[in-house]
Amino acid sequence: MPVDVEARVIANTRLSTDYNVIALSAPAIATSTAPGQFVMVKLGRGSVPLLRRPFSVFQILRTNGRVDGLTLLSKRVGVTTGMLFDAVEGDVVSCLGPLGRPFQPVDPPAEAWMVAGGVGLAPFATLTEALRGRGTAVTLFYGARSGRELFYLDWFEARGVRLVLATEDGSVGDRGRVTSPLERELQCAGGLDMTVYACGPEPMLKAVARVAAKYSRPSQVSVERVMGCGLGGCYSCVIAVRDTPEGPHYVRSCIGGPVFSGADIVWD
Amino acid sequence: MNKTQSPKPPTALSVHIGSLRLSNPIIAASGCFGYGVEYRDIVDLSLLGGVAVKGLFLAERPGHRPERIVETPAGMLNAIGLQGIGVHRFIKEKLPELRQRHATVIVNICGSTLDEYVELARILSDADGVAALELNISCPNIKEGGITFGCSLNGTFDVVSAVKKVTRLPVIPKLTPNVTDVASFARASEEAGADAVSLVNTFLAMAIDVETRRPKLSNIVGGLSGPAIRPIAVRMVYECRRAVSIPVIGMGGIASAGDALEFMIAGATAVQVGTANFVDPFVWTKLLDGIRDYLGRHGIAHVSELTGTIDTAARENEWTSS
C-alpha cells in the first residue's frame, strides 16, 4: 500500500553536470519497494511545478541491516529534476510510493540480461540485488552518450554483474546504441535460457523488445510515460497493449505497469 | 423530494443536493478519480461526500493517443478523450465494490446524441447504488455530442428535460465555462428541472513546444484545470448562485479547505476536487479537517449556513469610507 512521506534529504551526490543521486529518508516506502517500482515526487508546496513526477527507486539504503531510506537516480531535464539536482541535505521531498507493478526476477539456470539506456539505469540496482539473492547470473548492457555518463560501474561489478558497455561517441565500449552488442550476444547465445529486462528511452525499449522476440526470449520493459497521479486516477500515462480479443487498448502504465512484457506493447 | 429515503439527522457537514443528502460537501470530481475503486486502498470512499466517477458513454471508448496531459503554470491541460469502459461494464465491474464500500456514487454520463443520455439515465436508474446523475455536457476534448449540448441553451434545456423524464435520480448538468454567460446555462438547466448544476468543467486551452512547433497534446487542444483557473471558477459560481435557486456545486482548482470555503461563500452548496487529488491523494481528510476547524473558529453550527454568504455590502462600505 503506498504511503506519502515527507522525506528528508540525507545526501545528494552530483555525478556530473546533469546527473545526481539523491538519498531520502523514507523507510516506510523503502521497506516495501520491489525492483522496478516507482515513487511520485514533489518538492515544495507551491503550484509550480504542480504535479508530482515519477522516479524509479534506485537503491534501498540500509544501516546495520535496517532499511532506512532510498535513493533516486535523476537526470536534470526540467523543473523537478532541476530542484532534485540542487537539493541539499535536510531539504524535504514529498515522496508517494511504492507504486506500480515490479519486474519479475528469474531463477537459475535462467540468466538475467538487463539493458539500460542513460538514466534508465535506475531500476537495475534493486533488480540486481533481487537476482543475486536468487543466485541468478546477471549481465548489464549499459548505453550512454559518452563514457562520462556511465555511472556505478564499480557498484555493479562488485556484485558480480557482467558489464557490456556502449557509448554514442565511442569513448567506452561499443560505438553506437546498446542494442548492437545485445543483438550480437543474442546471436551467440545458443539455447541459453534468459529473460531480457530493459529501461530507457522508448525507441530503445522498442528495439530491445523486437530483438528479444527475434531470438525468442521473453522481455520485461519499464516504460516512462507522462504521468499525472501515479494511482490510476487521471488516465494520462497510457500505452497501447495487445491483450484483448478485440485488439489493442490503452492501459494505464502507473497501475498496469510501468513494467510490461515487451511482446504485449503495441509500439508506435 | 424522494420520500422513500429515511430521514437522517443533520450533522455539521451534511448538505442536500435535491433529494440527495451528502455526509459532507466534498466530492471527488469526475475524470480525476478513475472509477473510485482505484483509490480503495488509500482512501475510505465512505468518508467522501460523493464520488463522481469518470464519464461514461454507453459503449467503451479508447480515448485519445498520448500525449494526454501537460503541465502549465499552476495548472494542467488534459485531453484524455473520455477513455472508458462503458456503462454496462461499469455496472458489472465497478458499482458493486463502490456499493460495498458505501461510496455515494454520482455517475457522470456523456452522450453523442440526446437519445444516448436518455438511455444511460434509464440504465443507471435501474442499477443499485447510484445516488445521482451528472450530465457531462461540457467535455472540451471530444468532437461529437457532449459540449454541443452544453454550448447551446436549447440543447442544455432539451437534454436535462429529456433525462428528467426517465429518472427519479437527482440530475446535475455539469456546465462548461467556455461560454459567454454561464449563468444563462444554469437558468436553462433549472427551467428544465435540474436538481443542481455543477461548474466549471475545464477551460479550452493549448500549449505549444516552441522548439519543435508541435502542440504538446496529441489532440492539439485540451482542458485547463488546477489553481490557475480558480478565481474564474469562483466568479462563475457566484454568478450562477445569483441566477438560480437550485444548488450549485462548485469546482476549479480547489486544493485546500480555504479554497473549498471560498467556493461555498461564493454560492456553492458542495464542491468537487479534481487536480488536487493528483498531487495529494490524501487531500480529503485535510479538506474535511480544515472545514471543521473553520466552522469551529467562526462558531458556525452547520456548513450549509455558509453557502452564498459573501458580504459584498461590507466591501462597498470599505471602499466608500476610504
Image (cartoon, grey):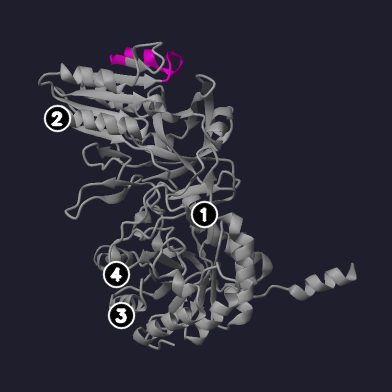
Disc 3 vs disc 4: Cβ atoms closer than 8 Å? no
* Spatial CA span between label 4 and label 2: 41 Å
Specify few, some or many for label 2: CA neighbours under 10 Å numbering under 14, 14-19, or 20 or more: few
Tell me where residue B89 sits by quadrant: bottom left
Amino acid, disc 4: Leu
Query: Badge 3 sits on which subunit?
Result: B
* Spatial CA span between label 1 and label 4: 29 Å
**Residue at the limit of the structure toward the left, as seen here:** A191
Query: Badge 2 sits on which subunit?
Result: A
Whole-percent x and y of residue A173? Answer: 34, 11
Q: Where B3 falls versus A37 (above or below)?
A: below
Whether residue B254 appears in magenta in the rendering, the answer is no
Determine if marks 3 and 2 fall on one subunit.
no
* Spatial CA span between label 3 and label 4: 11 Å
Tell me where residue B264 sits by quadrant: bottom right
Residue ID for mark 1: B276
Q: Nearer the viewer, mark 3 or mark 4?
A: 4
Amino acid, disc 2: Ser
Give left or right: position of A82 versus A151: right
Q: Which residues are magenta?
A: A145-164
Query: Badge 4 sits on which subunit?
Result: B
Q: Which mark is residue B58?
A: 4
Residue sitting at x 41%, y 64% = B143
Residue ID for mark 2: A216
Disc 3 vs disc 2: Cβ atoms closer than 8 Å? no
Whole-percent x and y of residue B283? Answer: 50, 55
Q: Nearer the viewer, mark 2 or mark 1?
A: 2
Give left or right: position of B35 versus B78: left
Q: Which mark is residue B122?
A: 3
User: Can residue B55 be seen at all in this image of the molecule?
Assistant: yes
Specify few, some or many for label 3: CA neighbours under 10 Å numbering under 14, 14-19, or 20 or more: some
**SS for dot 3:** helix
